[in-house]
Amino acid sequence: MTPTPSPGKPMTIRAGYDIRFRCEVPTPLVLMLSVHPSRRADLLQPDTMATDPALPVSCYTDSFGNLCHRLVAPAGETRLHTDFRIADTGKPETLSPSSREVPIAQVPHEALQYILPSRYCDSEALADYAWKVFGDMPPGWNRVQAIVDHVHNHIHFDYQRARATRTASEALAEGVGVCRDYAHLAVALCRCLNIPARYVTGYVGDIRIPDPGGPMDFSAWFQVWLDNGWNDFDPRNNAPRIGRILMATGRDAADVAISTAFGTAELARFEVICEEVDATGAAQQGQRAIA
């Protein structure tokens, strides 16, 4: 388990990205890189995606409530970037061990879809395993946390062995993956037990904890519907964090891909930043800047 961050006063976070694609021919792209509408009121500067060269960009909200951008990248290199500030409480995420699971008959209509299997969360293949390991546990927040602990301890994090097609059952069998695999397996195990669970992407900076090293990236975690609403769980880090910034939610990674190219788009550069800044805009000592 990673260290729990020390609490603090309200703070400002600087976040953003610098992503470049190289295309041989004009290629349509759909991008899901914006801060989620639920955090819009916290933005101190607009989270505006800029393009080099300047391109026509259209926006729409998908069926899950995520903000998406569409553009056609020309032949050659296209740069997408943003650099914004967002306010945060500065407090670690709240744990809620008294929260209870909701009977199926009382699950809100909009949350029912998050009990069903999906492309990468193949819960049908994991049902027997889930009920054997977690079925006798008292339902509620602590059972979900037991699933998170199990996934955190079972999967070995390894960027070199990442695979975009890996399903939850394959992650269990292979015992290796990246943050999306941790989230997919935990989501699928929850769904096996009729607990609504959805996949989430966003920024998770290493704020007020020791620098773990390695490049900064966007992160995947998941949310579970309990009697107090949606609760964040992070099987990769498995500890409360400060400054988590939600970007998108969906059934699994297929719904919230940060980029979808309708053709060939080679990734030429990928940098992400998420750091606490002081009143002057300077990064706090010991934190990572752009990777």
Image: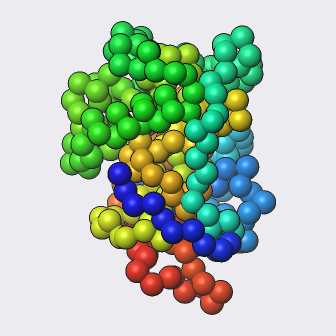
- Left or right: residue 131 compared with residue 8: left
Residue at the spot x=73%, y=49% of the render? 38
- Left or right: residue 19 compared with residue 269: right
Quarter of the image containing the C terminus? bottom left
Residue at the spot x=55%, y=75% of the render? 276
Locate residue 248, reporting x and y percent: 60, 44
Residue at the spot x=46%, y=21% of the render? 137
Locate residue 174, reporting x and y percent: 21, 29
Question: Would you place residue 91 above or below residue 32 in this image?
Answer: below
Residue 7, picture quadrant: bottom right
Question: Would you place residue 211 above or below residue 165 in this image?
Answer: below
Q: Is residue 182 visible?
A: no
Residue 139, picture quadrant: top right
Question: Would you place residue 243 above or below residue 211 in this image?
Answer: above
Camera-side residue: 87 or 166?
Answer: 87
Residue 122, picture quadrant: top left
Outermost residue toward the bottom? 280
Camera-side residue: 252 or 68?
Answer: 252
Locate residue 140, reporting x and y percent: 57, 27
